[in-house]
Image (cartoon, rainbow, N blue to C red):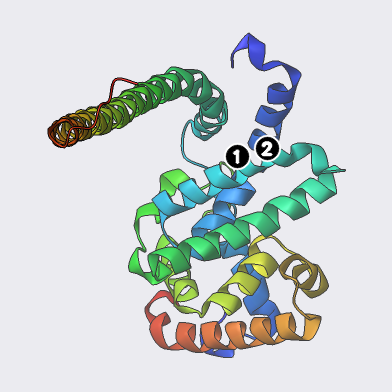
Amino acid sequence: MSAQMGMESTEFRGLIEQHQRMVFSIALRVTGEYGVAEEVAQDVFLELYRGADKLESPDHTKFWLRRVTVNKATDSLRRKSRRPEAVAEEWMEEKFLPDGAAKLDPGMEARLEDLLRTLPEPMRIAVVLRHQEEMLPDEIAALLGQPVATVKSHLQRGLQLLRRKAAVTMKEYVR
Amino acid sequence: MSEMNNWNNEEFDEELARMLPHVDAPHGFAAKVIAAAEAPKKAKVLAFPQIRTWATGAIAAGVIVGALAVGDVHRRHEQQRAEAQRQFDAATQITDRVLARARQQVVKAGISLEE
């Protein structure tokens, strides 16, 4: 980083390093495409750079990042008329797994990622925020600006769909 | 792992959470974002001469068009002035001839114009 960027940019770099995995993972699982997720994540942080002074606390920053990431990822899907199930394999390589992550059956994990991509967008977003970000339904509702009942419904129906599809398509991994 | 057909909601929730870990951002992501954040500042510095060149060209074109328009107006005024002068000269000649003829007729009639 150049010296003239000063303290603000040092803080900015710190925020990127702290949140990039979260932002990128949400973008990736909503859009389903590695390159698009990178663009979305970059846009999110550039918007943070322009408006960081409006964020009042670390929690506010995290909330803001999650919300803007979801919005930009869904915008990107709509703009490109792209369905995330179009690209499945590229980012499931082991190199993208975080250090120290529990070693899962890669076939099983890939299949689950595939199935997640087949969910309708609102259900997929709710499932990602609930199970990847470990957010509670009321937190998700606040983030998405939806009623809690709607979020719970999306979660319930999304999980039902996933379970049903998993039962049919993942038998070969269950021994 | 239990049979998927027999998964209850809690087990499935736990499996999902385990199978949806955060993934690493692309290599060099932070550096790319910081470079992109800096880019508009540089773009502004670079863009200014481009804007200045463009504005200079526009002003020059405006001056040329203006000069041509002024020249055209001036030429039309000159043409109108010349035409007016020609008509005035013609009218003066006609008047002179009519006056000369009238004078001849008056002289012929024996009327003195000397007084």
Residue B84's quadrant in the figure?
Answer: top left
Q: Is residue A134 visible?
A: yes
Q: Which mark is residue A13?
A: none
Q: CA distance from mark 1 to mark 2?
A: 6 Å
Q: Is residue B59 left or right of residue A67?
A: left
Q: Quadrant of the N terminus of chain A?
A: top right
Residue A36, percent across and down? Answer: 43, 53
Towards the viewer: B69 or A37: B69
What's under tag 1, amino acid-wise?
Leu
Residue tagged by mark 2? A50
Residue tagged by mark 1? A46
Residue A99's quadrant in the figure?
Answer: top right
> In the image, what residue occupies the spot 65% across and 73% down?
A126
> In the image, what residue occupies the spot 46% across and 34% down?
B27
Q: Are marks 1 and 2 in contact (CB under 8 Å)?
A: yes
Residue A29, percent across and down? Answer: 52, 62
Residue B97, compared with residue A47, is above or below; it is above
What's under tag 2, amino acid-wise?
Arg
